[in-house]
Amino acid sequence: MRVLEDPIITQIIETDEPHTLGSAAVAAAKLLLAGEVVALPTETVYGLAANALDPAAVARIFAVKERPAFDPLIVHVRNLEAVREIAEVPSEIEDAVTKLANAFWPGPLTLLLPKKAIVSDLVTSGLPTVAVRVPSHAVFRRVLKECRLPLAAPSANRFGRISPTTAAAVEKELGGRIPLILDGGACGEGLESTILRVTRPPGSPKAVLEVVRAGPVTREALKQFGIVKKGSREPRPDAPGQLSSHYAPTTPLRLLAEGEGFSPEPGKTYGLLSVDGEPGRLNLSDFAEVAVLSPGSGKLSEAAIRLFALLRQLDESGVDEIIAEPVVEQGLGAAIMDRLRKAAGCG
Ligand code: TXA
Ligand code: MG
């Protein structure tokens, strides 16, 4: 593929002022309408966007990311009406979907719905469902408005690597492979969207919400909208974000159990991913690098926002192994632990 063989110049455009946002969005829309890929900020992580209705443009996403074609993409649109142009909302889940949309869109929730024929099979890897979401980031929304296309967009990293939460991280991952990155600053959520399969078994008064990927919209927040279940883990995962090697730094990462101690092996260097910088039983002097997820408030939202950037920092620091402390598996903590387990290769 051209994109991988010949490096191209990657332009980065700032979007921090209203007039720069407008012209940046026009530049991005022009490329997208021409079948190109563009990296855009969302409230979760940066995405690599292309026209979801154009198989050649979608193929370019897979080539640039070196992503296997069996891993389907999320399609981003402006609102629930636009969702209905690309997906069916079966009558038995109409009520639940409308309520979820009202509560969480625009925002970090992705729904799996039966796909309409207009969506390229490449987007869904041949699956009968399409993953859809309505992002809230002002830059992404402005681009959607300019180009008037549904945009397929996976996280803007090479396959299996850590999702980027800044334009600089996108440049490291995909610089020289894509023509444009819109810089919208650091992402506000820091973790990829929650993915839900919504069904309603015959006779059930409530919808069943199967969490296929944990994310910023927590189980606790979903409870009032249906019966929340953990996503199934089939041998061939139909959400390969569930693959156990996903989100992996190149440095080995070990996730400690709650209260577990650590003793260094002589001659090896270690980096610590600490929750609050007060690692109880651990000895800070055992670590060449210490990164603190939540140095200020100790809150999980702060930890989520910082997680991928700190993983990258530890990965680049040259230590032999990263040791990660566990977080409490409640609320956002469930999504953080999901990503840490995957980074440790035991997702
Ligand atoms: O927050 C996010 O969701 C970010 C931003 C850019 O929107 N996107 C993102 O995309 O995380 P990606 O491709 O890195 O992860 C999408 C996940 C994959 O694990 C994929 O397998 C799953 O969504 N997925 C997509 N379509 C699916 C489908 N029809 N059925 C099951 N899983 C699906
Ligand atoms: Mg991804």
Image (cartoon, rainbow, N blue to C red):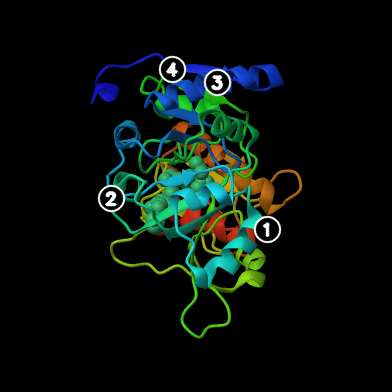
Which residue has dot 1 on it?
103
Q: Amino acid at mark 3?
A: Val
275 sits to left or right of 57: right
Under tag 4, what secondary structure? loop
10 Å crowding of disc 2: few (<14), some (14-19), many (20+): some
Instruction: Please report whichever mark, 1 or 2, sits nearer to the chain's N-terminal start.
Output: 2
Question: In the picture shown, does residue 121 fall above or below 52?
Answer: below
Q: Residues within 10 Å of mark 3 (few under 14, many from 20)?
A: some
Give the image location of residue 196, x and y in percent. Answer: 50, 62
Q: How many residues crowd around disc 4 within 10 Å: few (fewer than 14), some, or many (20 or more)? A: some
How far is mark 3 from mark 4, CA to CA?
17 Å
Question: Secondary structure under badge 3?
Answer: helix
Q: Nearer the viewer, residue 258 or 75?
A: 75
Depicted 72 relative to depicted 209: above or below: above
Q: Nearer the viewer, mark 2 or mark 3?
A: 3
Is ligand 1 within 8 Å of the beta carbon of the residue shown at mark 2?
no
